[in-house]
Amino acid sequence: MIPAAFDYQAPATLEEAVSLLAGDPDGAKILAGGHSLIPAMKLRLAQPQLLVDIARIRSLAYIREEENQILIGATTTHYQLESSDLLKQICPLLPMCAVSIGDVQVRNKGTIGGSVAHSDPAGDWPAAVIALDADLLLIGPNGERTVKATDFFVNLLTTDLQPGEILREIRIAKPSGRFGESYQKVPHPASGFAVVGIAAHLELNDDGSCKRAKIGVTGVGVKAYRAQGVEAALAGANLDDQTIASAAAHVCDGVDANSDLYASGEYRCALAQVYTRRAIQAAKAV
Amino acid sequence: MPTSYVGQRVRRTEDPRLIKGLAHYVDDIALPGTLHVAFVRSYYAHAKINSIDTSAALDVPGVVAVYTGKDVAKIGPVPCAGALPGLKVPDHRVLATDKVYFVGHPVAAVVATDRYAARDAVDLIVVDYEDLPVVTDVEQAAAGTGPVIHESFGDNIAYKMTAGEGDIDAAFAAAERTVKQRIWHKRLAPIAMEPRGVLARYFPGEEELTLWSSTQIPHLMRTQVALMIGIPENKLRVITPEVGGGFGSKLNVYAEEALLGWISMQLHKPVKWIETRRENIQATIHGRGQVGDIEVAFKNDGTLTGLRYNVIADLGAYHQLLTPAIPTLTGLMLSGAYRIPAIQINITGVFTNKMATDAYRGAGRPEATYVVERALDLVAADLNADPAEVRRKNFPGKDEFPFHTATGLDYDSGDYEAALDKAQQIAGYTQLREEQKKARAEGKIMGIGVSTYVEICALGPSTAMPAGGWESATVRIEPTGKVTVLTGTSPHGQGQETSFAQIVADELGVSINDVTVIHGDTSVVQYGIGTFGSRATAVGGTAVYVAVQKLKEKAEKIAAHILKADASKVSFEGGKYSVTKAAGATAATGSSEPVYPVGQGPAGALPEPQTEGRTGLTIAEIALAAHLAKELPPDTEPGLSATYFFEPKNFTFPFGTHIAVVEIDRETGDIKFLRYVAVDDCGRVINPMLVDGQVHGGIVQSIGQAMYEEVVYDEQGQLITGTLMDYAVPRAKHVPNFELDRTETPSPVNPLGVKGVGEAGTIGATPAIVGAIVDALAPFGVKHLDMPIKPEDVWRIINNDSSRI
Amino acid sequence: MKKAINLNVNGVSRTDEVEPRVLLVHYLRDVLGLTGTHVGCETSLCGACTVMLDGEAVKSCTMFAVQANGATVTTIEGLATDGELHPVQEGFWECHGLQCGYCTPGMIITAAQLLERNANPSREEICHGLEGNLCRCTGYQHIIEAVEYAAKKTAS
Ligand SMILES: Cc1cc2nc3c(=O)[nH]c(=O)nc-3n(C[C@H](O)[C@H](O)[C@H](O)COP(=O)(O)OP(=O)(O)OC[C@H]3O[C@@H](n4cnc5c(N)ncnc54)[C@H](O)[C@@H]3O)c2cc1C
Ligand code: FES
Ligand code: FES
């Protein structure tokens, strides 16, 4: 329950945060919502020497529509995303994903940036941001750079973030034309994390057929991934039950599914298929 | 007896402090200069300790002391009260000495000026362990093979026991049919929301030690801890402040409780230890942990003729207070709600490298009910009969009570058929079966489970209890007319501050607000046994009830004396003693007003009540007169107080019927409740709201057991479900809307007619839930599934793959 | 190194120096003596520690006190106004929404948040809203009824 001792800084600006991190490359850690980091610290699984609290940087929490983009500040909380009327209209996948996370208290504090940066294999946001082909804007000692979300998740709890870098913004191209979205999740009965989470974004033709599908999957592998087999099977196809079912069957292609006490890899894949189908059905009905 | 409170949904008097956050649990008590204790616990399930280096820990600023096993050798062993013939009892020291026997076994205690230093120092203690072979497999242990945990015993068998009546061999030899099933009861963690905690303060001048402990048994703990640490029992005071749930896990005497007291005596400072949840799952007792074969002999018409249960009980590495006794309770309840002429249980209790099992809500009885009810389902399946009808056929009739079972019990009273009828009627059972047929035809997977349970409560006659089975109460009316009740029970959520006050207020004709129930302080309350085994109301409440009667006898004598009337002419009604008037005259209306409303009474000497020429006196006036002692009948002790120790002649046997209806998602194996109906009979009801609450809570713990909860150790004895991240306690979203009702069959065992209800939910519900799931899957050839039944298990059945079942 | 913090707790302004590793729950309990907020786990899953922070229900075991610098905190002790119980507190009392009471403060704060955001929740919404709070005693049914009671009471 009691973390190891550390120092704490609450910079007022991002630039200050970057330089604080640069000052202690080994021992410093970013603190955002703290809802992955602090539980780990309480169990002493993480023992940082310095916490740089970016959640107090006011300018880092926002949801904005700019030209054809949706801009989301890294410290925007799950609840802010869940309750955003703007997003419910222009990108409902985000609030749907947000509301499925943990519980009210977690959503009030936890941030999208922290979740994406942490890349928990059972975290929900990674599935959504890759399904939306988001761009991630990072800032570090060497300035800013942009990474595609699909390239950002590298391995178990590992991302493309370099030492000292901060994820500052998530950018999503505003969906246009006819589209449908859904997030479907099997929560673990104890932790609430995703046993399987499927984020579906469908671009639809006027006749209701699928122009393009983007399916993000979490919980199944060591990191969130795009189910390319499913996407390929749906591209240009009519979204009848048969097509959807056979497309969904590809959701675990090439993935070595996680096994744990609650669900074996085999069962997880079966769940992933069912939930992929349900997510596509729900998205197409929007 | 007038019933202005008893039987009503009275709001709890304990609630205001709790809902305002003003109540005090152990950790809420702050004493100046308190030192904090943190434990080094074993990461190994079985290992030799070669050495312990505490030097770095002692260098941490704030660290006052570090104790290891050799430092505390003077403290006596952790007690086990379950004396069975031939029982092997390992020497259970408060800290590990040369070996560790389970993950979480305490190895060293760090004492520091604050929690932070204590916790930091724990990381700096270096223990050199040498791995030993680990025993986790109970069947291997029961076979007497493999590595031995306590070497001097030669094997891992702690005891073997056989019990039962009737000629079991003949029953099976003559059986027209039999069924047999191996059944697991996995280990469960009780998870009281408040973990354990102890605060100890020793006053060296007075030579007095006070222990504030989150326990269900303050007096028993006082006796045991006094013996362990060698302090006279009358110099040790145990206080249980608010206790945040127990469920049996705090019906124990743990190493930490004695150790904290001892440390305080060494350091002459208050010391506190508050368990973390991880420690709680590692080193607070677990429940259940049995595997056995149930066999039933029966006739072609469904009449039961014999039942045998061969069971292995996973006791863990050491005995806690009642560890070996729990499976014997299973044996007692194997007759269920049925007439079974021959019953036998064969128990093998084994040591494993795990935490001890002990009493968890139900304590041995849920295991019995579950195997019997599962067996009844198997009988029904074998006969292709309705499970409810097979049960009905074997019920003893309501006029057959007291009903003797082949497990040696005499059930006090019951009307099992009435409860079944009522539950079936509420559930619309016949219609449900029709719906099920339709659902099946539509390809849906739906099931209905029925459980008709009996439980044994009001533990119990002292002959059947290791430390006495009676309970005590004192009822006292103070000079100002306020009523004080001291109960030897130790409520921790059950609401006896309210229900006992209901009983007393009705008996004395006073307002419930004038009654205060005090418990959980060994210096204030006469010796008591505690709260467990659904005994508090039936045994403790009866003690209160009888004490009030004694008090009233005395009050009546005083009243007669003051009113200058013959005692036979004095009657008590509405809180007032009056001289019985001639026919036609109305009785004096009583007032429950105290003589002096608080704050308005005169300071200094209390003026005597005006008694001259009165025809009636309130109980408060009599109390005052009794205290002033100026006008008492000859040979009457001053004061108005009575104490009673109630020794029950028998247990009580509540019963009921639970019906669960589930639907299963064919694609995912997900299980959803459609209905949950429970009709419970706990005898006479003091407060229906509290009874409902007990039933709800119990059923949800059953849902946990049936579908989510399992303490898992791997082959190395590592605890895999060590936090709430992995150990799934049901949440609001996991529970159905309960449809509750009752039948009320009073118990003849006590004058209140109450039976007890604390464990009904954990006893009656698991078989209904599992029965429903199995029934749903019957078309797939399923006859039994072990708990917890997870969606994957169900999914595999539907997909015709039994590899994980 | 200790940090200065200033926050408003139940209407009272507090200034203290705390070690960064002091969790908000420990600050409230050990420093301010507000022991109504409880601790039931280390993994942020039980919700016994829930308090209102700037109007949002948060688990005070999953926050350092330094993070609450400048914030307004309401604990269970501060929920009643002028001695009058909050409707949720009243609901818990009326409907027997508590037994041992250990989960209760966190449960009540979370339920208060739930009703602030949704004045007339369905049973399902109540269950979703209470997902972060464990109760081992009540089986939840009376808690759900308590929240329904409070919703009705607030509406009238
Ligand atoms: C009880 C509980 C249940 C939960 N259930 C779920 C669930 O169902 N689904 C789910 O997805 N998550 C769940 N979570 C996790 C929760 O969503 C976290 O909030 C989230 O994973 C991390 O976000 P945070 O802001 O809290 O990050 P923090 O804990 O502050 O940080 C997490 C990690 O990311 C780093 N970091 C944070 N922000 C940045 C940034 N902007 N740039 C670079 N690095 C950064 C930190 O240094 C740290 O290593 C749960 C958590 C809890 C406590
Ligand atoms: S103490 Fe359990 S969630 Fe905070
Ligand atoms: S009332 Fe005891 S945990 Fe909820």
Image (tube, coloured by chain):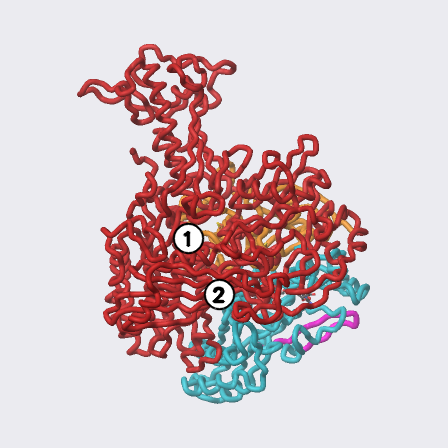
- Neighbor class of circle 2 (other Cα within 10 Å; few <14, some 14-19, many 20+) is many
Please provide the residue range marked out in magenta.
A131-147
Q: Horizontal and vertical percent for residue B241?
A: 55, 41
- Neighbor class of circle 1 (other Cα within 10 Å; few <14, some 14-19, many 20+) is many
Q: Nearer the viewer, residue A39 or B656?
A: B656
How far apart in space, not on screen, are marks 2 and 1 (Cα)? 23 Å
Determine the secondary structure under disc 2.
strand
Residue type (three-letter) at the residue carrying disc 1 = Glu
Q: Horizontal and vertical percent for residue B97?
A: 70, 56
Residue to which mark 1 is pinned? B759
Overall secondary structure of the magenta stretch? strand
On the question of residue A145 being in view, the answer is yes
The quarter holding residue A32 reads bottom right
Q: Is residue A210 above or below residue A95?
A: below
Q: Chain of mark 1?
A: B
Q: Which chain is orange?
A: C
Determine the secondary structure under disc 1.
loop
